Every structure is written in structure tokens, then in C-alpha cells.
Amino acid sequence: DGGITQSPKYLFRKEGQNVTLSCEQNLNHDAMYWYRQDPGQGLRLIYYSQIVNDFQKGDIAEGYSVSREKKESFPLTVTSAQKNPTAFYLCASRTMTGHSGANVLTFGAGSRLTVL
Amino acid sequence: AQSVTQPDIHITVSEGASLELRCNYSYGATPYLFWYVQSPGQGLQLLLKYFSGDTLVQGIKGFEAEFKRSQSSFNLRKPSVHWSDAAEYFCALSYGGATNKLIFGTGTLLAVQP
């Protein structure tokens, strides 16, 4: 079945370390997104990409970096510059063809990052 | 600026009772609106969406939502709640034209009493 795979599901990191969260999709979706989720704050957009080798900053991009070398992959690096990285991170994707499907996001199961 | 407000942080209902979760939005044009559900430690699953046309939309798991432009609302309803409906529910609005970014409400956590 098609879907989005995020790994690892749980990750612990020491302060000052960079970590990379993986996101892979086999839905042939064009656009991919990273959201951060904190209790009581909903989801906030970190980065998004609509095409290979191109990506844009979302609302809270500081301290994060991404790459989009392949259509199916959109890894997120949480750098040591991110002041409060402990959170639940969600990857999502969507097709950009047609109308009714163009706006619907499919989500992965998430990765929970804890900084010790 | 666009925004989504879910006024209720936490709601508790009895199993079999009806449910209504509130969502209000602010947007200058006709909105694309969504309801997603999230089980603990999981990703989000789409319940239903509104793009245009009939203002009462049906979704999965027996949920429905009504778009009311005059009230800038998109409330989610279910006539009879099941224990498995306990989860967090997010209302979202799509904006940004071709970029189609989503802005989410802060969520409503639903607890179901036996």
C-alpha cells in the first residue's frame, strides 16, 4: 500500500547535536511538507517543497534545514541552532494535479524528538 | 490575515451522545476547509473536506460538517459518538494559491465516557 514512512519514530538527542529525520513517500506526490506539533499549538509549517531540488521556508524554519534530491524523499535536519527542538514532527505530501485532490495532505505517523 | 480558531481545547461526551466540535476561520476569499483526526502518537487522517457546492459535507466514520459563510464556521458533528472516536481533532484552512499551504487550529481533544 502507498503511504508515507517516517523514521525514526522516537529519537533522543543531546544538546548541540544535529539530527536528521527521514521522510519517504511512495504515493508519487509532487509536494512534501514538514510540520512541527507542540501541545496546545496545533501544527506549524517548517518547510515545504513542490518540486525536486526546490523548497521554501514555512512559518518556523529557523534552526531547520531540508533537502529534496529525490521526489520520494524529503529529510529534515534539526540543527543545534534550533532553541527548543523537543517536539513531534510530521511529514506530509500531496499531489498537485487535478483539483479536488490537490489540496488534501497525506500524513506520516510522525517522529518524536526529545532533547536531553 | 488568515486564521483558524477552535474554541474548545477539551470536550468530554458520553458514548452514544451527539457531538459538535466548533471551528471558526478568518479568510478573505472562499476557503478550502478540512477536518483531520489524530490518535495519540499518530499522524493525521482526513475526515472530510469542503471545497465548494453543498455546504453540508459527509466524511468518514459517520462525521459530517456544515460550512456557514455568514458565521465563518465549519463545525464538525456526529449524531452518536463511539468510544473509538476519542482522539484530537484539527480544523484546517488551505491558503496561498498555488502553494496551497494549510493553517491548522490548535485542536480539540475529545474524551468519551462509557
Image (tube, coloured by chain):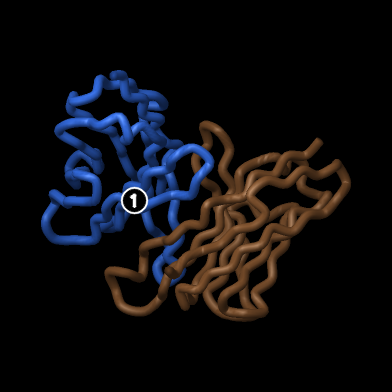
Chain colours: A brown, B blue
- Indicate the position of residue A85 as horizontal and vertical percent values: 72, 43
Q: Is residue A109 left or right of residue B75?
A: right
Q: Can see residue A75?
A: yes
Q: Residues within 10 Å of mark 1 (few under 14, many from 20)?
A: some
Residue type, label 1: Tyr
Residue B69 is at least partly visible in this image:
no
Return the chain for callout 1.
Answer: B
Q: Is residue A102 left or right of residue A74?
A: left
Q: Which residue lies furthest to the right in this view?
A: A16
From the image, which quarter does the C terminus of chain A lie in? top right
In the rendered view of the protein, which quadrant contains the N terminus of chain A? bottom left
Residue B48 lies left or right of residue A19; in this view the side is left
Residue B16 located left or right of residue A51: left
x, y percent for residue B79: 15, 33
Is B79 in front, or is A62? B79
Q: Which residue is drawn at 55% across and 48% down?
A: A44
Q: Which residue is drawn at 18% across and 24% down?
A: B17
Q: What element carries label 1?
A: loop
The part of the image, by quadrant, that contains residue B97 is bottom left
Measuring 32% from the left and 47% from the top, which residue is drawn there?
A: B35
Depth check, front residue: A76 or A64 = A76
| Number of on-image labels | 1
Q: Is residue B103 above or below residue A56?
A: above
What residue appears at the point 50 percent right and 73 percent down from the top-left corner? A26
Q: Mark 1 points at which residue?
A: B27
* Residue A78: % across, % down: 74, 54
Q: Position of residue A72 (x, y in %)?
A: 57, 75
Eyeballing the image, is A1 above or below A115? below
